[in-house]
Image: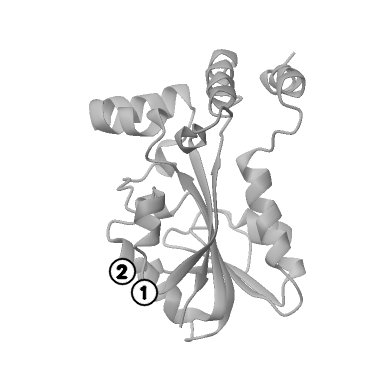
Amino acid sequence: MDNRVWSEKILQKLDPSFKHRWELFDEQITHHLNRKTVWLDLGCGNNATVAEFGRYAKYAAGIDIIRMPEVHRPFVQADIRRLPVAEYSVNLITLRFVVEHFRKRQEYFYELHRILKPKGRVVFVTTNIWSPFIFLPRLLLPYKIKHWIITRIFKVNDEDIFPTFHKVNSKKAITRIKGFRIAKFQYISDLNYTRKWMFLIFLFWHLITRLPGLPFLRTNLLVILEKEE
């Protein structure tokens, strides 16, 4: 039995209502899309999200500073801080594990504010700095060891690893973003199927953080910001 099937069977017994972070994120994308929506997915990688959901929007495109060898269209190669997009032209911006790489928080969000229409929204999922799975490695482990763990244990490709600064990874930090109000803020759990023992650790932590007062220790954040004028 492969890891995913094995893990799903355990999950269905212990928490059948659980939704993975990508399911929650995709739900928010489809909820915000209609035939009037102009949508940009920033830090899109191979642009698979736009390829899957773009048909529900008036116009959808992916933007990334790096062009992958195989990328779905429409795609634009650009820096998020200098987007080749007109002011007040976009309804929805999405970012999947991108904002943790912002070195200067406001520098990026000024640009997002510039291109969004009034009441336009930014939907993003990112790591939670208060989760011990995030702050302890950040505090205690040298970069080389963290890099080894990510590539060897989590099986992430070396080219997919970028420096993290965690300037947008707590509720307090997000409330300081100028020009936006928080429309939704949710602590969410991450379960990893790469290895069975790893899945059990993350599942145990998810069950612990279901206790009152502990959701703030979950591994990820799902956030929706609405543009203020």
Counting from the top left corner in percent of width and height, residue 208 is at 54, 23
The image quadrant where one finds the N terminus is top right
Q: Which mark is residue 7?
A: none
**Element type at marker 2?**
helix
Say which amino acid is labelled 1: Tyr
Q: Amino acid at mark 2?
A: Glu
Asked if residue 57 shows in the view, the reply is: yes
- In this view, the residue in front, 102 or 167, is 167
| Drawn side of residue 104 relative to residue 2, left or right | left
Which residue appears at 63% of the width and 44% of the height? 22
Total numbered badges shown on the rendered structure? 2
Q: Give how far across and how far down residue 7 sits, in percent.
A: 69, 20
Residue at left offset 44%, top offset 76%: 113
Which residue in the structure is indicated by mark 1?
110
Which of the 4 image quadrants contains residue 176? Answer: bottom left
**Vertical side of 141 occupied by 77: above or below:** below
Q: In the rendered image of this protein, does residue 86 appear above or below residue 38?
A: below
Q: Percent x, y for residue 224?
A: 55, 60
Return the residue at label 2.
107
Residue drawn at 55 percent across, 13 percent down: 197
The quarter in which the C terminus is drawn is: bottom left
Q: Nearer the viewer, residue 73 or 202?
A: 202
Q: Nearer the viewer, residue 60 or 179?
A: 179
Identify the residue at horizontal 31%, vertical 69% (top origin).
107
Disc 1 versus disc 2: distance between alpha carbons? Answer: 6 Å
From the viewer's perspective, is residue 126 above or below residue 177? Answer: above
Graded by Cα atoms within 10 Å as few (under 14), some (14 to 19) or many (20 or more), the crowding at tag 1 reads: some
Q: Residue 202, image x and y in percent?
A: 54, 23
Q: On screen, 63 above or below 133?
A: below
- Residue 168: tell me if it is visible: no
Near mark 2 (Cα within 10 A), the count class, few <14, some 14-19 or many ≥20, is: few
